Image: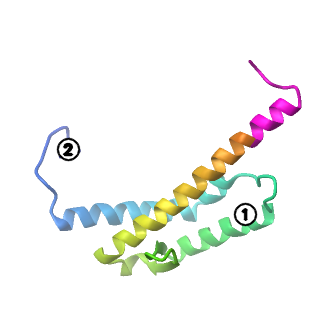
Amino acid sequence: MYDGRGGISGPMDFDESWARFMIAEERSLMNRAGGILAHALARALPGESQDELDGWAEEDRNLARDGLVELMDEQGDIYYRHIEELRAEDVADRLRAQTARMDWLGWRMDQRLEWVEVWRNSSGRRRD
C-alpha cells in the first residue's frame, strides 16, 4: 500500500483508516457548505425547475453547515447523522449515499450533453 511519502507500507490499522475517512468527510462537508452542489447543478435542464434546484442546493449547504452527513440505508431511504456521531457501521450507508448522488449528477451531465447536442444540431451551429 502506498504510504503517501513515496514508499510502500503494510495494511493500515483501523484507527488510521477511520481518521482518513473522517478527514474526507470533513472536507466533503466544507465543500458542501461552500455550495459545491449548486455549482454541479448549474442551470436547470429542460423540464426542471431552477427554483427547485436552487432549493436543493441551499438545503444541502445548510445541512453541511449543521455538520450533517447524508446516509442511505439498504432500502434506499436517506437519513442524516452528525459527523461527530458517525460510526464504522455507517460507512456502507455513507458510500451508498455518495454513489447515489454521483450517479444522479452523472446522469444530469449526460442529459445536459445530449441537450447541447440537440440544440447545436437544430440551430445549425454544428461543428464538424
| Residue 2: assigned label | 2
Q: Is residue 83 above or below residue 1?
A: below
Q: Is residue 6 above or below residue 21?
A: above
> Which residue does the image show at 29% across and 74% down from the upper left?
88
Q: Is residue 86 above or below residue 46?
A: below
> Disc 1 designates what residue?
53
Identity of the amino acid at label 1?
Leu
- Residue 93's x, y, as percent? 41, 72
> Which residue does the image show at 69% across and 47% down from the upper left?
111
- Residue 67's x, y, as percent? 48, 75
Considering every residue shown, the one lying at the far front of the view is 75
User: Is residue 17 magenta-colored?
Assistant: no
Distance, label 2 to label 1, CA atoms, is 40 Å
Q: Is residue 35 above or below residue 126?
A: below
Locate the C terminus by quadrant.
top right
| Display coloring | rainbow
Pick whichever of labels 2 and 1 is earlier in the sequence.
2
Helix, strand or loop at label 1? It is helix
User: Dot 1, crowdedness within 10 Å: few (<14), some or many (≥20)?
Assistant: some
| Residue 106: assigned label | none
- Residue 56's x, y, as percent? 67, 68
What's drawn in magenta, residue-wise? Answer: 115-128
User: Is residue 121 magenta-colored?
Assistant: yes
Considering every residue shown, the one lying at the far top of the view is 128
Horizontal placement of 62 versus 11: left or right?
right
Q: Nearer the viewer, residue 6 or 79?
A: 79
Considering every residue shown, the one lying at the far right of the view is 123
Horizontal placement of 27 versus 7: left or right?
right
